[in-house]
Structure formats: structure tokens, C-alpha cells
Amino acid sequence: MSAAETFRRILCSLSLLAVILDLQLDGVLGVTHVEIEHHLEMGRKLLAAGQLAEALSHYHSAVEGDSKNYLTYYKRAAVFLAMGKSKSALPDLTRAIQLKPDFLAARLQRGNILLKQGHTQEAREDFEAVLERSPDHEEAGGQLMMVTELEELQEEAHEAYHQGDYSTTISVLERVIEISPWDPESRELRAECYIRMGDPQKAIQDLTPTTKLRNDNRAAFLKLSLLHYSLGEHHESLSQIRECLKLDQDDKDCFSHYKQVKKLSKQLDSAEELIQEERLQEAIEKYESVIRMEPNVLHYINLANERICFCLVKLQLADEALDVCSEAHQRDPRNANVLRDRAEAYILNQDYEKAVEDYQEAREFDADSNDIREGLERAQKLLKMSRKRDYYRILGVSRTANKQEIIKAYRKLAQQWHPDNFQSEAEKKEAEKKFIDIASAKEVLTNPEMRQKFDTGEDPLDPENQQGGGGGQSWPFHFNPFESGGFHFKFQYN
């Protein structure tokens, strides 16, 4: 056998071996050319059908099967973009461009993403690369002009900010963020302007998306937590600071603030639980502790005073409630809850005019509250009744007096206004009238059902409130004031 023949056979053997090895390799990897094509076709169909997650799975398999195919990377990037995952699409577009530098579609797509992220220099390079190969490309030309506009706006915004002109900065950044909505720096700068202008709510709106625009944005989570904390939103503050610690549990600033928020949140939650359990004095102590803990955060001081005011009213400590509620109202004049509770304290003190005034003012700030509407109606009824007969005032007792105190006051007044203590006919008539009022007050206030009606603004002894519209019966329930309480009177008339 000649040397040439031997060499030819060796080549044939090597070629056969290569084919065998390729087939074996395909078997090991589990991916053949046919299977890659299948994944690409399924990915295309699923993408067209809007089944993005399933499409992405097939493109993952296609990329793993053929890491040299620039189109596969490009198609997977398209799915990422459809899913709103621009940061994931960017590496695939970059890889597609590396594999095929003249792939203009990938260049244009990457430039658009970079522009939205605010990376003007990198975006400019991509659009210029497209225009270099295709000078008449309208989209690339338009986007390149947008890059120039963005650069000028960014410079203008920073200049206004450094001059302390926050209103102008915000105005310029409106257009900046319109062009590059995925740029965290522009949103962070606008948030800082809002903070300096005293509008933390708008600062929160700008900072919230930046936590997703950066891979590790602990600074934004901390600032968000501080802002929510300053607004009295302790639960949301706690939620944000926990997100910071998820990124780095050893972050000193976040951990320090976490301890502070956690402690305050525990106190506030505990106080509300005590109110629900009607352990009102303990709840007051908790809120007083909150004031000592955060003497410089207005929202927590206002909240604590509001809830202490509420508890004191529930405890029927009218004078203390009026002091605390008035202080809370002075600190927070538009707080409808404070006005409502102070109105109830005025009712306890039988100052119905002021109660009506507070309820009317509370309704201006919270027109939809049923509690305020019903409270106003009750206060107005009590005011109207007080101008006729106020049984508490007749006996000289507080609205919180118990049955024993009521009977004691009744007996003292009944003895005082005994008609036989008076000589003239006019005096006897006056004494009789007063005694009827005294006996009426005792009858109503010692009867739980009648007292409840009176406390809600209805006089149970008023003929107008009786069934059938009255009928002239002034003394229901077979009540005779001259046979009440063990007193028996004889009146002599000349």
C-alpha cells in the first residue's frame, strides 16, 4: 500500500471518528441541531401567543445548546424586554453584538435601553454605530438627537440643584425622567428636591422605583424607611428597613434604624391592643412612653395625644380629657378624631354648645364619618333638651354619676324643696314645680333604659316622644312624683 493511500485512509478514519464523537457529544448534552431548531420555533410561537415564561424557557435551552448563535441571544433578549426585564436583556444584546458586530437591530435595541437608563455616552456609541453603516436610519438619527437633548437637560438640572433652585430642578427632571425612566439617579435627585421642599410623599413616590432600578439600593431603602417614619407610618417604615437588611444584615445604618423602628412599632401596636381589650389606663401609659421615646417626631406625639384623649373620654374623665384633647387639637387642628373625642368630653361636662361646635368642625374635615354624623345629631338633641330639662343639671350630678349618687342628690333636693317648707301660695307652687323636676330626674336617671334614652338625646318623659304623639300624658310608667322616694306630701290651699 502506498503512502498516499495510507494517508487517505487515515483521513477517512479521522472524519468518521469526528462524526461519531459529534453524535456521542450530542447524546451526552441531550441537544441536537434539530432540537435547537425545535426550541427556537417553540419560543417564537409562544412569544407570539404572549406566553412569555414558556417562551423564555425554550430560548434558554436554545442558548445552552448553541452559545455561538447571535440570533438566539437576540430572541431571548426580546422575551426579556417583553417581560419588562431590561437589565436581563442587556447582556444578551451585548453578546449578540460581540458575535456579530454589524448586527444593527441589536445595536439599536441596546442603544434604546441605555438611553432609558440614562447612560448617554454608551447609547450615543450604539446609535452612531448604526448610522455609520446605515446613514439614513431614521430611528437611530432621532434617538441620537434625544441623547443630545438628555445630556443638556441633565446638565441644566444639576446646575439648578447646586444653586438651590429646587423647583426648576424638578421641572427639568420631569423631561429627563420622561426620556430615561429607568435612570435611578434622576429620580433620586428629584426625591431630594422634594424632601428639601417639604414634600416627603412625592419623594417616596420617586424613591420607591429606584429600589428595583439598582441591584443593591440599601441607601434608598433606608431613606424610604426614614421618610415613612417621619410621617408616622411605622409599619411601612419597618417593612422598608427590613428590605435593606435582606441585602446586607450587617449594614450598620439600617440595623440601627431597624432597632429604633421596631421598638416604637411594638409600643404602638401594644397600646392599640390594650385599647381593644379596654385596658385603657395601661394604653395611656404606653402612649405616654411613646411621647418620651420620640419627643421630636411630630406625628407620633400627635398620634399619642389623640389616643390618650380617646382613652380619657372612654374612662369618662371629662376634665383630664378636655385638657389633653385641647392640647392635641392645638397641635393638629384638622384632626377630626380629636374634635370628635373632645366633643364627647364636652358632653360629659354637659357643655352641649361646645360639643355641637366641635362635631360640626370635625364634619368639615371628615364628612363621610358615620360616627361624627351620629355624634353631631346626638349633641344637637342634647343641646335642645338642655334648654328644656336637663336631668343631670336638675340634680346637680355629673353624667357619670352612679345610682347611689343620684339617689343621694335626689333626697337632699327633695328635702330642700319640700312644699310644706314654704308658706305663701306662690312659694308652694314654685316648690311643687321644682319637686316635680327633681322627681322626674330621679325617675329617669335611676332607670337604666330611660337613662340610656336620655343620654342619646331623647327625653323619655317628654309627651312628644311617647307613642301616638303624646295624648297629653306627662307621666308614663304610672309615675307619681308625690309618692316617690318615701316622701308623702300634703298640700293645703286657701
Image: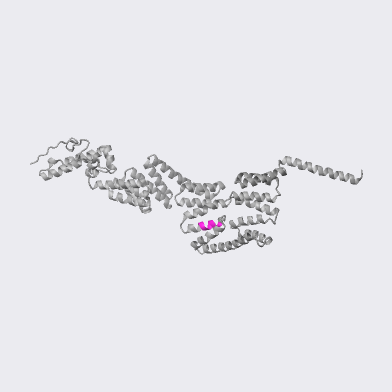
Q: Position of residue 167 (x, y in %)?
A: 48, 62
Q: Position of residue 325 (x, y in %)?
A: 34, 49
| Residue toward you, 265 or 95 | 95
Q: Position of residue 237 (x, y in %)?
A: 48, 48
Q: Which quadrant, please, contains the C terminus?
A: top left
Q: Is residue 109 magenta?
A: no
Residue plotted at (76% across, 43% down): 22
User: Coloring scheme of the render?
Assistant: one colour
| Residue toward you, 395 or 116 | 116
Instruction: Give the residues drawn in magenta, as a range.
Output: 185-191
**In the displayed structure, would residue 120 be above or below residue 225?**
below
Name, please, the residue furthest toward the left.
494
Magenta-drawn stretch, dominant element (helix, strand or loop): helix
Residue plotted at (47% across, 51% down): 228
Q: Is residue 171 left or right of residue 327?
A: right
Q: Quadrant of residue 430?
A: top left
Q: Is residue 456 left or right of residue 494?
A: right
Q: Is residue 423 left or right of residue 318?
A: left
Residue 184 in view, yes or no: yes
| Residue toward you, 305 or 460 | 460
Name, please, the residue furthest toward the right.
1
**In the displayed structure, would residue 337 be above or below residue 481?**
below
Q: Is residue 188 magenta?
A: yes
Q: Position of residue 138 (x, y in %)?
A: 63, 61
Residue plotted at (63% across, 52% down): 90
Q: Which quadrant, please, contains the N terminus?
A: top right
Residue 462 in view, yes or no: no
Q: Quadrant of residue 6?
A: top right
| Residue toward you, 59 or 234 | 59
Residue plotted at (62% across, 47% down): 48
